[in-house]
Image (cartoon, grey):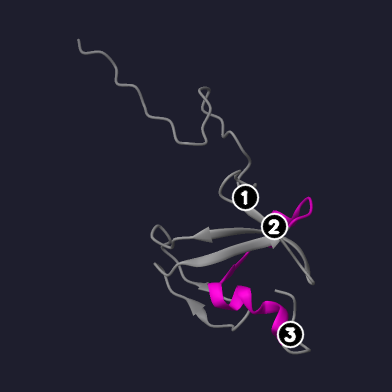
């Protein structure tokens, strides 16, 4: 009888199989907090390589195609992870310069 193979754990998985952090929570060293006139935001750069779906950018309302590097942001308050939005990198940088009548995200 051959010995059982050990299953490799994911980078955020504990030995008992539970996730080490809640889904959508900040990842130290990957996320950063940006402060701007529109508030404080947790920002994460996404390479887009593993993304299999398209997102709609709230800045230009155009599609972010799968595989395109972009930015994911959410408000830096408790429970803000539920308001994550995917932005084109340039749209995220220019969000403060948008005209009146445009929503925050």
Residue beneath label 1, please?
24
* Residue beneath the point at 56% across and 34% down: 19
Tell whether label 1 touches label 2 (CB within 8 Å): yes
Q: For numbered disc 3, what is the local secondary structure?
A: loop
Q: For numbered disc 2, what is the local secondary structure?
A: helix
Mark before the other along the chain sequence, 2 or 1: 1
The N terminus appears in which quarter of the rendering? Answer: top left
The C terminus appears in which quarter of the rendering? Answer: bottom right
What segment carries the magenta color?
Answer: 76-98
Residue 30: where, in percent of width, then height?
Answer: 56, 49
Residue 92 within the magenta-colored segment of the rendering = yes
Mark before the other along the chain sequence, 2 or 3: 2
Report the residue that reaches farthest toward the left.
Answer: 1
Residue 78: where, in percent of width, then height?
Answer: 78, 50
Does residue 88 appear in this view?
Answer: no
Q: CA distance from mark 3 to mark 1?
A: 26 Å
Mark before the other along the chain sequence, 3 or 1: 1
Q: CA distance from mark 2 to mark 3?
A: 21 Å
Residue beneath label 3, please?
102
Residue beneath label 2, please?
82
Q: Compared to 73, does 8 lie above or below?
A: above
Classify residue 76 as left or right of residue 64. right
Numbered circle sitting on residue 77: none
Q: CA distance from mark 2 to mark 1?
A: 8 Å
């Amino acid at each position: 009888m051959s010995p059982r193979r050990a299953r490799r754990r994911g980078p955020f998985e504990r030995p008992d199989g539970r996730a080490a952090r809640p889904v959508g929570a900040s990842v130290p060293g990957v996320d950063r907090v940006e402060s701007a006139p529109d508030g404080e935001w947790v920002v994460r750069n996404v390479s887009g390589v593993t993304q299999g779906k398209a997102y709609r950018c709230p800045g230009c309302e155009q599609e972010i195609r799968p595989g395109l590097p972009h930015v994911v942001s959410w408000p830096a308050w408790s429970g803000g992870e539920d308001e994550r939005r995917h932005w084109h990198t340039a749209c995220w940088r220019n969000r403060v310069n948008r005209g009146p009548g445009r929503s925050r995200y």
